[in-house]
Image: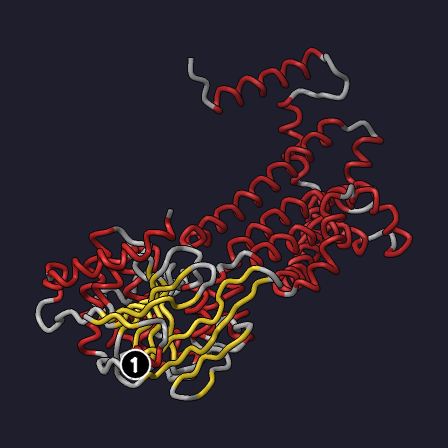
Amino acid sequence: MRTSPFWSLIFWAGLWELAGRMGWIDLIPPLSATWIAILELFERQTFWDALELTARTFLIGLGLAIAVGIPIGILMGLSRRADKLLSVWVNLFLSAPLTAVVPALMPLLGIGEATVIATVFLFSVWVVIIDSQAGVAHVSTSLVEMGRVFGCTRRRIVFEIVVPAALPEIITGIRLAVIRAVKGVIVGQIIIALIGFGGLFDTFLSMFLMERFWALIIILFAMSFTLIGLIELIERRIAFYAGTR
Amino acid sequence: MSVATANPTAAAGAGEAAEPILRVRDVGVVYSGSTVALDGADLDVPEGQLTALLGPSGCGKTTLLKIIAGLLEPSSGSVTVRGREIEGPGPDRALVFQDFALLPWATVLDNVAFGLRARGVARKEREETAQHYINEVGLGGFEARYPHELSGGMRQRAGLARALAVNADVLLMDEPFSAVDEQMRRKLQEDLLDLLKIENKTVVFVTHSIEEAVYLADQVAILSRRPGRVAKIIRPDLDRSGDVDAIRRLPSYVELVDEIWASLKHYVE
């Protein structure tokens, strides 16, 4: 029998409901109760405040990562010297467990939005740099030679040939940065545990409000999936010329 | 048909060659200290004629073309155009690329006009010029298309139009038809000959195909490998006055292809 994703979803939702009603695990309330908690959350001002703070810190942190990451990546792609100087650090931080760094940011930036923004930035900037660098470094040599043959200045070659040619990779970097920034904005708030969704999670858990806790998890998952889906949609529109280079 | 020796001055003395517009003198290229790509390459390119650089792969013919284009600096020797030594790329030379080198995000019109834009030509004027050459290479009606919507042959027509549009005296072509299928290649070769009857260009044409070299060229420079240099100059002197597709049936065409193959054979074995 062919199982569609729909039936699979029904099955797991049913199992969740059953587990909650039978009380198999203390931490898991029935799905239906969680669903009601979602609707209740939407009515609470604290939820909207947390959402606003999350959106703001996410956008500022991601925006900074893109604004700083793309020029650095392009520079590394153009100059071998810059690449040698920086690639060690970029690669180190790209795979480093950055969550461990967040507590160190708190005494530096205070227990507030600045730390969350810094966390988002630190989570997302490296992949923007790496992908921009790769995009620029792999621009076909004949396109650059074409620019030289037809008398382009170095500036024109960089901005009208190299950067547009690297655009698909840069967009990929941004997409991956969005995914990392979602992690960053949540991790930052959870570790601080006082503001935004981190504060809500902390309250719900300490007061054992498991319906609300799971409701918040579902909302956050749904939001990040929607966001990533949106980015992939944009990427597909831009990638049409990537295959023809 | 006449066969001259490697000495370019002797070749020029044969009488059929026009005044050379481009001279390559004793050009050598050493890669990373040890690998020798070219060693004492000499070549005279007569004005208004097509010179083919023919040789086995790895003989440095594309390297030589890129030096003439000013993209590579030779380790030794010099290249002069109308008596002036070149220092990098210049408006007197335009290049047609093996892989077309078209901007994938730009239309045919913008691609063809690219060289003019880089030279600061105003939009209206450069688009008129581009349109003229788009029609001339047979791409009329495809101005608004993007490269990925075109066949390989059409892409190379756009590459050719871009090189023609900047009105350089010397047209450099780096295996321009090697990325298209055989039927398309023959069509492009014939169209190139027809085009050169209208456009008075000096062409340096890199190819690894003996047939292509003999069919197209007024002068075939055969490059040898180790040392990479111009080993022999052959002037096909085929009767090109009639139909372009008649050339392939000339007995002298067939003979010459055989003769060049005989002299190149030992590089392959």
Up the image or down, A208 lies above or below B64; here it is above
Q: Nearer the viewer, residue A122 or B66?
A: B66
Q: Which quadrant does the N terminus of chain B fall into?
A: bottom left
Q: Which residue is drawn at 65% across and 53% down?
A: A130
Helix, strand or loop at mark 1: helix
Q: Which residue was labeled with disc 1?
A: B12
Residue A75 located left or right of residue B176: right
* Residue found at the far bottom of this picture: B83
Amino acid type at image mark 1: Ala
Any part of residue B166 in sight: no
Q: Which of the chains bears the disc numbered 1?
A: B
Residue A79: which quarter of the image? bottom right
Residue B211 located left or right of residue A118: left
Q: Which of B47 and B41 is in front in this view?
A: B41
Residue B214: which quarter of the image? bottom left
Residue B20 located left or right of residue A51: left
